Image (cartoon, rainbow, N blue to C red):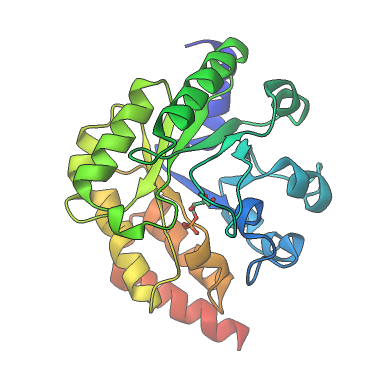
């Protein structure tokens, strides 16, 4: 692996082999969704506890201080909205030249396996990998399901993750599911877990993140279950303990409760 590629991957994946990516990219198709109305305010208290920020170029330039940043994974796919005809109909929105100008550590693109736009999204991934490999920029593939949340089972996620890796993604972001080891075992590149919509309670998140880590994930790319929580800093600190300090769900709950009471 060339120096640039290795250097960027080592900015993202920490020395313990684990990673906590913070996605604040949801506005690219959801607009000013709840708790991301002013993304800069959402990012500010959380940034120091993340290993990288997953974000679009617009919010990066407008809301993140260049002198006070973490490694950036630039969201480079889009072109759809929650009120449009199909979330899967994405294209590439940002050039590799722009990614280099922004000095990013990686670029991220969604793929929609099984959708009407499966072929386009996978070929976009292939094109992005061609360019990323030329310039030493890793590509993170996001195995997206659009509004079809029920697709999130091991069979589907293993298929989508493996295809993403085969097409050259250096990291794959996918959802947690039962039998998550089937997903990680079939995917020859590091896997990070997305959270999906906010769960009923924090404990569920600690449980699935812990289970995913035991079953081969290297970390998380988890957004709404952090920043939609009433105590986002408590949430990210508790998750950080699972990712980097081998905390179990009970210890994570204790950290969450201690941090939560500090705020009150
Ligand atoms: C949304 C994304 C997010 O990065 C991903 O879904 C993770 O966020 P969440 O935990 O909220 O699902 O790709 O465009």
Residue 22 versus residue 257 in the image, above or below: above
Q: Most extreme residue toward the front, as rendered?
A: 85
Q: Tell me if residue 17 comes above or below residue 146 in the rendering.
A: above
Residue 87: in sight, yes or no? Answer: yes
Q: Is residue 178 above or below residue 121?
A: below
Q: Nearer the viewer, residue 18 or 211?
A: 211
Name the residue rendered at 81%, 44% in the picture: 61
Query: Measured from the top left, where is residue 209 in percent x and y?
Result: 33, 58
Frontmost residue, 264 versus 181 = 181
Residue 89, image x, y percentages: 52, 40
Left or right relative to 241: residue 224: right
Left or right: 262 as drawn, with respect to 115:
right
How far across and how far down the image is residue 25, in percent?
Answer: 62, 51
Res. 136 image quadrant: top right
Q: Position of residue 181 (x, y in %)?
A: 19, 44
Which part of the image, by quadrant, shows the C terminus?
A: bottom right
Q: Residue at x 51, y 49 (%)?
A: 87
In the image, 194: left or right of 85?
Answer: left
């Amino acid at each position: 692996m060339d120096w640039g590629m290795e250097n960027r991957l080592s900015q993202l994946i920490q020395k313990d082999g684990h990673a906590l990516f913070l996605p604040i990219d949801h506005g690219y198709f959801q607009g000013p969704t709840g708790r991301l109305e002013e993304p800069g305010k959402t990012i500010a208290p959380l940034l120091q506890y993340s290993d990288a920020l997953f974000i679009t170029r617009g919010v990066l330039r407008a809301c993140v201080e260049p002198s006070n940043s973490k490694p950036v994974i630039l969201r480079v796919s889009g072109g759809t909205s929650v009120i449009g005809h199909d979330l899967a109909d994405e294209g590439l929105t940002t050039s590799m030249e722009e990614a280099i100008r922004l000095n990013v550590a990686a670029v991220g693109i969604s793929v929609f396996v099984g959708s009407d736009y499966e072929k386009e999204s996978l070929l976009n991934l292939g094109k992005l990998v061609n360019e990323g490999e030329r310039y030493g920029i890793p590509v993170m593939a996001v195995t997206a399901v659009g509004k079809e949340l029920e697709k999130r089972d091991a069979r589907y996620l293993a298929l989508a993750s493996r295809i993403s890796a085969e097409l050259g993604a250096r990291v794959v972001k996918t959802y947690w599911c039962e039998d998550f080891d089937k997903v990680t075992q079939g995917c020859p590149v590091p896997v990070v877990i997305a959270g999906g919509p906010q769960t009923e309670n924090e404990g569920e998140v600690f449980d699935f993140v812990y289970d995913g880590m035991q079953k081969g994930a290297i970390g998380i790319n988890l957004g709404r279950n952090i920043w939609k929580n009433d105590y986002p800093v408590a949430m990210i600190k508790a998750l950080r303990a699972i990712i980097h300090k081998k905390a179990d769900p009970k210890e994570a709950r204790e950290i969450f409760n201690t941090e939560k009471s500090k705020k009150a």
